[in-house]
């Protein structure tokens, strides 16, 4: 699983437990905890890859290329994706790593 997603889930659980323990949860709006978690994570995972996932450094991504046939032409698309998404594109679209 993507590291930033795991950290997001763990941090959300921790903040929610703390809010319940301190009895402030009832005073929070539904989006307060997710916003706080997003702000905290953005300090550590500040690079957004082409797949939309967050990583701490661009070197944590995999640079791949594949052919996109969506507009009828065979256009080559390339970019940095997380390891999970890169593997998925390799299997489904025949993507290859760009060195």
Image: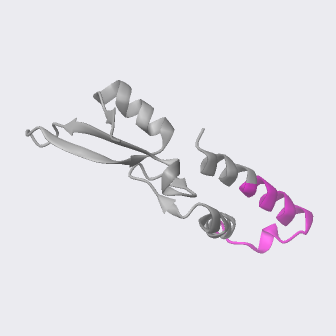
In percent of width and height, residue 75 lies at 14, 42
Is residue 18 a member of the stretch shown in magenta?
Answer: yes
Q: Residue furthest top?
A: 91
Quarter in which the N terminus is drawn: top right
Quarter in which the C terminus is drawn: top left
Relative to 68, is 28 above or below?
Answer: below
Relative to 98, is 14 above or below?
Answer: below
Q: Residue at x 83, y 65 (%)?
A: 19
Is residue 26 a member of the stretch shown in magenta?
Answer: yes
In percent of width and height, residue 58 lies at 48, 56
In-image side of 62 versus 6 (left or right): left
In-image side of 36 versus 47 (left or right): right
**Which quarter of the picture shows residue 70?**
top left
Relative to 18, is 73 above or below?
Answer: above
In-image side of 90 versus 43 (left or right): left
In percent of width and height, residue 30 lies at 65, 66
Q: Residue at x 79, y 69 (%)?
A: 26
In percent of width and height, residue 25 lies at 80, 67
Identify the magenta region: 11-31
**Which quarter of the picture shows residue 91?**
top left
């Amino acid at each position: 699983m993507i590291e930033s997603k795991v950290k997001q889930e763990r941090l959300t659980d921790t903040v929610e437990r703390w809010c319940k323990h301190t009895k402030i949860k009832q005073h929070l709006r539904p989006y307060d905890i997710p916003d706080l978690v997003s702000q905290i994570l953005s300090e550590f995972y500040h690079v957004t890859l082409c797949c939309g996932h967050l990583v701490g450094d661009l070197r944590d991504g995999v640079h791949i290329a594949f052919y996109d046939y969506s507009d009828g032409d065979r256009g080559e698309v390339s970019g940095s994706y997380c390891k999970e998404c890169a593997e998925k594109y390799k299997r489904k679209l025949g993507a290859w790593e760009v060195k």
